[in-house]
Amino acid sequence: MILPAALTKQLLVWYDSGHRELPWRENPSPYYVWVSEIMLQQTRVEAVKPYFSRFMKVLPNIAALAAAEEEVLLKLWEGLGYYRRVFQMQRAAVIIMERYGGRMPQSYAELLCLPGIGEYTAGAIASIAFHQPVPAVDGNVLRVLARVTGEEREIQLEQVKKDFFFALKKIYPQKRCGDFTQSLMELGAVVCLPNGMPKCGDCPIADWCLAFQQNRTDELPIKKEKKPRRIEEKTVFLLQCGDKIAVRKRMEKGLLSGLWEYPNTEGCLSKIEAEKYLKAQGIVLEKITALGKARHVFTHVEWHMIGYLVLCRKEYKDTVWVTSKQIEQEISLPSAFRHFKV
């Protein structure tokens, strides 16, 4: 696979002519690049901006991240989802403090050894923060390259990613490696859009793009068909006693492991069924009110939920009782449960 060397200069000129101003681009330090790239996995740029700014105010460096308490981490990450990412970041931060004196290792190989850092993130840190000619090939970049080359294989295949990695490495500039990496990211994010909707008229490399020339932008890239999400039904209870609301920790394994939740059970129970279930749990209730239905989508699972507000005569022993203010300021409650409010 060969990419035209002219792409490099053309993309850098285009990038210089005007690119998005993003908080992590103002100071492309290794820490900024690392945190932003982890946050941007499975999450839109606009959604990440406020999270990134808040995270940096509380945990401005690797040492602070390594020493942060779990509840602080969870609260800073609340709403971003895929919480495993932040725990892996902290594990990596501890290793960096112990092995590298708090300084991010510069070598691509060493970066790959850190928890939560895969080939893409290692390439982004190496090229953007350390100015090394190492590609960062994510979904956006794969889409660009598949269209430019007319790639007929499924882009999820590891061999396809490797082929594009080495093809890109051959055309990396000696200088401005980070800008070149970001120009590819930028092109995929704002011009070479997915689902057959690219803005080819704005593309600086349309002259080299086979998909554009052959009118195949709606066909490429080729992706393996996704399996349908598994549907799970749940009944969620907001147990209220005075000004306190019941929460509990989820199990340490599985979806949203170790996070806080409102008490819940499998199945969408009717009001009568919910009342019978609560009584069987030993909950003495005064009133139960339906809060409506909600749907929450995870990567491979979709929750269909019904919620109930339950006024209790006394605090149920198997939960932790907190105020609404504590939930907002201290307790990390996943977005799935925030569909329901008192």
Image: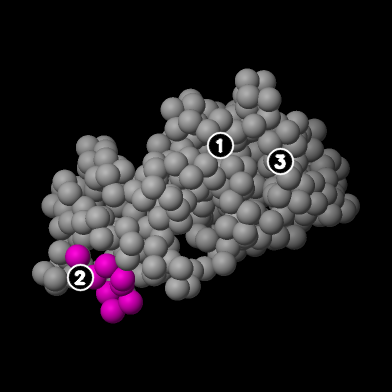
Q: Is residue 329 magenta?
A: no
Amino acid carrying label 1: it is Arg
Viewer-proximal residue among 132 and 144: 132
Q: Where's residue 273, x and y in %?
A: 59, 48
**Secondary structure found at label 3:** loop
Res 263 seen here = no
User: Which residue corresponds to the image point at 68% horizontal and 36% vertical from the top-left?
Assistant: 62
Point out the stretch of residues depicted in magenta.
200-208
Q: Which residue is mark 3?
A: 61
Instruction: Say which residue appears at 13% left-offset and 52% top-offset.
Output: 152
Instruction: Name the residue furthest front.
Output: 174
Residue ID for mark 2: 207
Counting residues from the start of the chain, the first of labels 3 and 1 encountered is 3
The quarter in which the C terminus is drawn is bottom right
Q: Give the amino acid at mark 3.
A: Asn
- Spot occupied by residue 276 in the image (x, y as percentages of width and height): 64, 44
Looking at this view, is 68 or 16 the one in front? 16
Is there CB contact under 8 Å for labels 3 and 2? no
Specify the label residue 84 is tagged with.
1
Seen from this angle, which residue lies furthest bottom? 201
Name the magenta segment's main secondary structure. helix
In the image, residue 205 lies at what x, y percent? 27, 67
> Residue 231, percent across and down?
41, 48
Q: Nearer the viewer, residue 167 or 50?
A: 167
Q: Nearer the viewer, mark 2 or mark 1?
A: 2
Q: SS class of the residue under badge 1? A: helix
In the rendered structure, the answer to whether residue 70 lies left or right of residue 46 reads right
Dot placed on the residue nearer the N-terminal end, 2 or 1: 1
At a point 64% along the width and 32% down the height, the residue shown is 103
Residue 62, label in figure: none
Q: What's under tag 2, amino acid-wise?
A: Asp
